[in-house]
Image (spheres, rainbow, N blue to C red):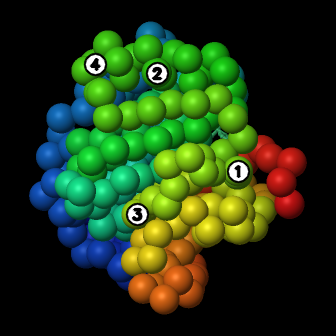
Amino acid sequence: MEIDTDIRDTARWLGVGRLDPAVRDAMNSVPRHEFVPRWEQPHSYENRPLSIGQGQTISQPYIVAAMTQMLRPRPDMRVLEIGTGCGYQAAVLAQCVAEVWSIERIPELAEAAAARLKRLGYDNIHVKIADGALGWPEHAPYDGILVTAAAAKIPGILVDQLAPGGRMVIPVGVGRYEQVLTLVTKNAEGIATEDRGLPVAFVPLITDIA
Ligand code: SAH
């Protein structure tokens, strides 16, 4: 698979040299063509980002795989995603962990994603329409938080909602070409540390929260 080569080439940024079999199985089994608009369907299995409408994009499969892997998913984990988009990343996560909560600010995208995920039989993904920078306190803390839009800075509320031992993966940076994928880890004592890694280009996280 092409993404294996990309993962190997960027291992020094990602901190992982090869895909976990569970992540690989998820990448192989989630039908990407079901998540993109009709005009993008012929390109569903190309390793590049695609349009999902509303000016938003779905990441290239390699980035989805890498971000999922950086969370070190386990079958008992509870994960929060910010930026549901079309629901593809949520579906990949849902194959690897116990429960996924996903927040999207654009109602049309959230509603379409929720309906699509239900139709495809994912019953462990919960979608809500809100500003994801506020997190989803009712179900916190999370073992993993995955942010799929670029934040100017790491939202403190999300760090607060991370469980001890938890991991958050978030693109940080203002300009589209000045973002780095950042890993936040919280130790057993609740102290969070940051590791900055792979250069990425995500749509912005739009929030009123400073
Ligand atoms: N994970 C998605 C990719 C989404 S693109 C997928 O697999 O399709 C990023 C998404 O983040 C967009 O849909 C955008 O509307 C959403 N977004 C941006 N700012 C947000 C915020 N503050 N809260 C929730 N969603 C946000």
- C-alpha distance separating marks 3 and 2: 22 Å
Disc 2 marks a residue whose amino acid type is Ala
Lower sequence index among marks 1 and 3 = 1
Q: Is residue 140 visible?
A: yes
Give residue 183's position: percent from left, percent from top: 51, 73
Q: Can you tell which quarter of the image residue 26 is in?
A: top left
For label 2, being within 8 Å of ligand 1 is answered: no
- Residue marked by disc 1: 134
Disc 1 marks a residue whose amino acid type is Leu
Disc 2 packing (10 Å; few <14; some 14–19; many ≥20): many
Query: Relative to the observer, which residue lies in front, 15 or 170?
Result: 170
Give residue 11's position: percent from left, percent from top: 34, 76
For label 4, being within 8 Å of ligand 1 is answered: no
Q: Which tag is nearer the camera, tag 1 or tag 4?
A: 1
- C-alpha distance separating marks 2 and 4: 10 Å
- C-alpha distance separating marks 1 and 3: 17 Å
For ligand 1, which image quadrant applies? Answer: top right
Disc 4 marks a residue whose amino acid type is Leu
